[in-house]
Amino acid sequence: MPGWARAAEVFSDPPGTAPHPAELRFLPPGAVERRRREFATGRACARRALAALGAPAHGPLPRDARGAPVWPDGTLGSITHCTGYRAAVAARAGEALALGIDAERRAWPLSKRATNAITTEWEAHQLLALQGELGPPWSTLLFSAKEAVYKAWHPHARRPLSFRDAEVRIQPVDEGGGVLAVRPTRLALPELSGGYRFDDGLLVTVVHRGLTRPVRSAPPRMPSDPQAHRSPVPERAAAR
């Protein structure tokens, strides 16, 4: 995690956690208790992350027309939840351009059909090159990374995004984590950095972009050989 971001995570829903009264209308009609709990706990994590920034943290987090959380003025962030895990990340808009998180409780790869649906041609070669490496199921990591990317890009995109609007480079550091690099394939969206961690079947990915680097106006090209990305990295950037 970059120094300008804050995170909060829990591995269960604390007793008594409830949505802010103004958030109740954003729950689907007839939402089951499990859905209400994960919704409430995810937003409780978001408020904890905002409080760690020193930002307003007591008000509601509504949803926009596409279902994404609306963060307090001057902040941005992302929320995720899966079985046995809820988390949120937040940052000040004056320090961050994009920030996204995703979590998956999955210890097996995606089906071949699902993998083909989310990969670019370059990413398909990359997944082949990663076969035999210790770590998470690589196709599941690719899916999780793209989920985090689309949350990070949401404020910048003018339309819904497809899985092939992003190309993700995966660089393992060890079997429990590694680093990510993301480029847009078609739209003028910011390149992203990030990382992932994988422990006991829980995969968490985070991607981000601070305001210290210029935003490219057109998508750059990646090297054609996925093996070219297997160079050592100076430090681990695991997700938090």
Image (cartoon, rainbow, N blue to C red):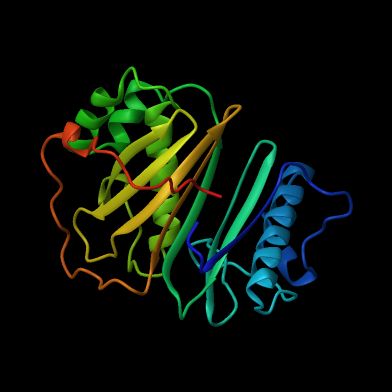
Q: Position of residue 164 (x, y in %)?
A: 26, 46
Tell which of 156 and 53 is nearer to you. Answer: 53
Position above or below: 128 against 216: above
Q: Residue furthest front?
A: 234
Q: Position of residue 202 (x, y in %)?
A: 58, 33
Q: Residue at x 18, y 31 (%)?
A: 227
Is there any visible trace of residue 61 in the rendered image? Answer: no
Tell which of 50 and 233 is nearer to you. Answer: 233
Tell which of 45 and 120 is nearer to you. Answer: 45
Position above or below: 22 against 235: below
Quarter-wise, where is residue 144 in the image?
A: top left
Q: Residue at x 56, y 50 (%)?
A: 240
Q: Residue at x 54, y 28 (%)?
A: 106
Q: Is residue 229 left or right of residue 56?
A: left
Tell which of 26 and 195 is nearer to you. Answer: 195
Q: Residue furthest right?
A: 16
Q: Position of residue 64 (x, y in %)?
A: 53, 69
Q: Is residue 1 left or right of residue 142?
A: right
Position above or below: 182 against 156: above
